[in-house]
Image (cartoon, rainbow, N blue to C red):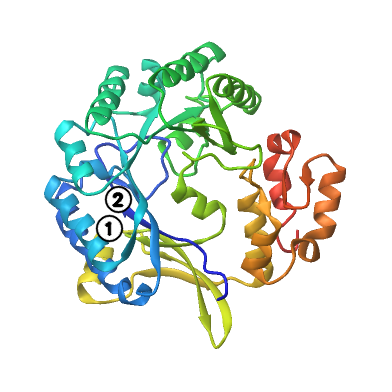
Amino acid sequence: MSFTPALGLYIHIPFCARKCPYCDFNTYAGLESLHDTTVDALCIEMERWGPRLAGRTVSTVFVGGGTPTVLTAAQLERLFGAVHRCFTVDAGAEITCEANPGTVDQAKFGVLRSLGVNRLSMGVQSFQPAELHFLGRIHSVEDVGQAFATARKAGFDNINLDFIFGLPGQTEASWCDTLERALALAPEHLSLYSLIVEPNTPLFHWVESGSVPEPDEDQAALHYERAMECLAAGGYIQYEVSNWARRTGECRDDETPELASRHNLIYWRNDDYLGIGPGAHSHLRTEEGGVQVERRWGNRKPVPSYGKRMRAGDSVEDFAEEITPPVGMGETMMLGLRLVREGVPLDRFTALHGRSLSDAFGTEVDRLCGDGLLTVDARRVRLTPRGLMVGNRVFAQFLPDN
C-alpha cells in the first residue's frame, strides 16, 4: 500500500464490579474466578498477532471494557507487558485505560502510570445522586472528585470524563449543573452520549413494562444544544459529534484539537485497528498480490469459551468479512463526517480508496450541500451546523443501495 493507515490496539476487559442496566457491552459482573485466566488468554492472543504485524507500529493503545481497573496490579502488569513484548509501540503512543471512579485508588493509578498509561477515561455519567442511582453506577458524586484529584496527584495530565444525557427525569437544570461541575474539574476531554435503550438490557425491559418512561428525543436534543453552548463557553472545542477537547492554543476551525482522543480518531478516520479479547472487533488492510484487501472480524463473546479456545490454539473468530470498495468508501464518509471540524479530507479519501471523493459521491455531496447539510471546499467535506443536528440522516446517504 502506498498509503499506510495508522494502527490502533484495543484490548477488551470483559469484567466489571456491577453491570449497569443500560449497558449492552460484552461485560460481566461476578466472574472474579475468570480474571486471571482471561488475562492469560489476552496475552496469548497478542502473542499470536505480534508476528503478523511485525512491520507496523502501534500508535495508540486503548484498554477498555468493562472496567479494566477491577484487575489486580499483577494482572495489569502481565497485560501491558504483553503489549510491549508483542508489538512495536510508538515512543509517543497515546495509551489509554478506562477507569471507574469506584474501583480506583492511589496505588492503582500509580501502577497504571508505571506501566506507561498516559491517558485515563473515567465513566462519571452524572453529578446527580438520583441519576447515578438510576444508571446503576457504583460510585458517588464525592468519589468522582476524589478519584480525579488522586489521578492528578499520580501524574495523569490527560483525562477524559464520560457523561450521559437524555435520562428519564433529567431536567435542563440538573444537566447544566452536571456540566458546570465537570468544567470545574477542567479535564482535558469530555464525551457526552445520549441515552440509548438497547434491546435485552434491564433498561429495555423497564421501558417495555412501562415502569420507566421512554427517553424523550426532543428533551435529549435540547440537552445536546445546551451542552454545545456550555462547553464552548467553558473553553472546549467540539471536534466530533459526541466529543470535546479543552482548547490549548490557536486551532483553526478545520483542525482537530491537540487533546482529541487519538485512539478514537483511528476509528473516525477509518484507519486500522486490532481488537484483542472476547467480543473485540478488528479492521485491517493488507496488500495481497499488489491489491489492497480490507477486512473486519469479531471475536466470540462468551468469556469461558474465549479463554478455552485461546489456550487450545483454536480460532476465536465469531465472524469475518471482506469489505467491498463501495462499503469501504461509504464507511469512510459515515465515520469521517462525525469529525465536525476535520470532516473528510479530499486527499485522504483518495489515498485510502484510490478514487476521488467527487467521483465516488459527487451526486450525494451536491444534493446534501443543496439541502444545507454539508459544506465542501478545496480541502474537505464536512457537516454544517444544521447537518450536525440530523447527522444520522446525512450518514445514511453514503450507504450502498441507499
| Residue at numbered disc 1 | 303
Q: Check the image and report above or below for 155 versus 3.
A: above
Q: Name the residue rendered at 54%, 14% in the picture.
A: 171
Residue at 77% x, 65% y is: 360
On the image, the x and y values in percent for residue 302 come to 31, 59
Question: What x and y, as percent, mark residue 359?
Answer: 80, 66
Mark 1 and mark 2 in contact? Answer it, CB < 8 Å.
yes
Q: Is residue 233 above or below residue 354?
A: above
| Residue nearer the viewer, 68 or 116 | 116
x, y percent for residue 320: 48, 71
The disc at residue 224 is: none
Give the number of the mark in front: 1 or 2: 2
**Which element type, helix, strand or loop, lies under badge 2?**
loop
- Secondary structure of the residue carrying tag 1 is helix
Please report whichever mark, 1 or 2, sits nearer to the chain's N-terminal start: 2
Quarter of the picture containing the C terminus is bottom right
Q: Quadrant of the N terminus?
A: bottom right
Give the residue displayed 33% in from the left and 61% down from the top.
89
Q: Is residue 290 above or below residue 318?
A: below
Q: Is residue 194 visible?
A: no
Say which residue label 2 marks. Answer: 14
| Residue 58 picture quarter | bottom left
**Does 81 sit above or below residue 139?**
below
Q: Do we see residue 174 in this rendering?
A: yes
Question: Hey, what amino acid is under mark 1?
Answer: Val
